[in-house]
Image (spheres, grey):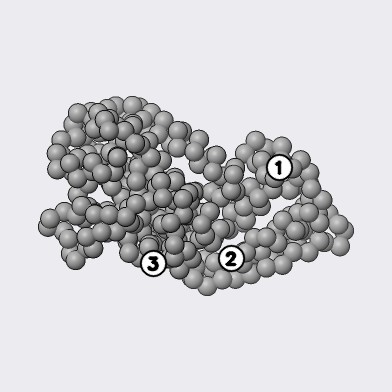
Amino acid sequence: MKHNNLSLHEWKNAFELFNKVSAVEIDSRGEALILKISMPLYEDPKKNITETKRITLKNLNDRFSESIYEYTRDIIRNVLMEWRSFIYFENTLVAFFDIQAYSKFIKHKSLGECIKVLKKLFDNVAVNWGTGRRATGINIPHWVFSDSIIVALDTYIWPISRVPLRLFFASCSVVMGGAMESGLPLRGAIGGGNFCLYENDNILISTALSDAADHERDQDWLGAVITPEAENIIKKYDNNFDSDDAITPYVKYGQIHWKRDSKRGRPEKLFYVKPLMNNPDWENYLPNYFDDVEKVANSQSLYR
């Protein structure tokens, strides 16, 4: 629900809905909230510490005047994110996508054209993400590093449940379909584990990303497998996620095309992400320099 201004009591009730907030009190002068926030320890993210934070009513209500904040939950989520010194998601899902034939992509286009293509892709994706965020209050963090696209599920704010899963898989599906329409075929994987990013120190450590990258490189199609570790994490929270009508358009179960020399005992069938693009002529979007015939043949089921 959208608001213009709230009382301290209303803000107090709203903060108490967030699992990272262990206690909320109104200060003695009736001007601010005193909050106890559970945060991961910088030196060891698996351990939590409790920090006391103070925020004034004016600070909270003034945020409604900023265009990026429309809903109470958006403001609280961003306040909590501002207070943390680094990003740590535990028992999360991380999507890793590799832009195929990237060296040829940057060779055939100028730097400005490359930036324009990637910016257009994420501008279009942002429309879908923005719709989901406004409807649910859930944010989907993402990063682009050269030929790699990373999408994470923020379990610091929102523990895994059906609604975050729907938005995460929808986001991955939109990225894959939008990239193909932009002439950027992707191959990827959804890994499970933790995700730790020290932004100020430019350090990224993630078992989920490692899990995803390990499975990504073994595939021989333009798909994105959901790894067994990711599936196990999902099923701890929702054992029947694949029967959810809001998830099934984006997640399918079936044969995974592994490289002949890299099967390493990989299961023949697993869950995978279906690109949001039902177009029998999808091959027309492939750039002229992409000539992996077998990979294209293996990908036909993704677009039907």
Give the quarter of the image for residue 233.
bottom left
Residue at the left extreme of this rendering: 261
What kind of element bears circle 3?
Answer: helix
Which residue carries the number 3 mark? 232
- Name the residue rendered at 41%, 46% in the picture: 249
Residues packed near mark 1 inside 10 Å, few (<14), some (14 to 19) or many (20 plus): few
Marks 3 and 2 sit apart, C-alpha to C-alpha, by 25 Å
Lower sequence index among marks 3 and 2: 2
Marks 3 and 1 sit apart, C-alpha to C-alpha, by 36 Å
Lower sequence index among marks 3 and 1: 1
Instruction: Report if residue 216 is visible in the image.
Output: yes
Which residue carries the number 2 mark? 39
User: Amino acid type of disc 1?
Assistant: Lys
What kind of element bears circle 2?
Answer: strand
Q: Decide if residue 161 is on the left or right side of residue 269.
A: right
Residue 299, image x, y percentages: 23, 43
Asked if 169 appears above or below 44 in the picture, the reply is: above
Q: Are marks 3 and 1 in contact (CB under 8 Å)?
A: no
Which residue carries the number 1 mark? 2
- Name the residue rendered at 19%, 28% in the picture: 288
Marks 1 and 2 sit apart, C-alpha to C-alpha, by 28 Å
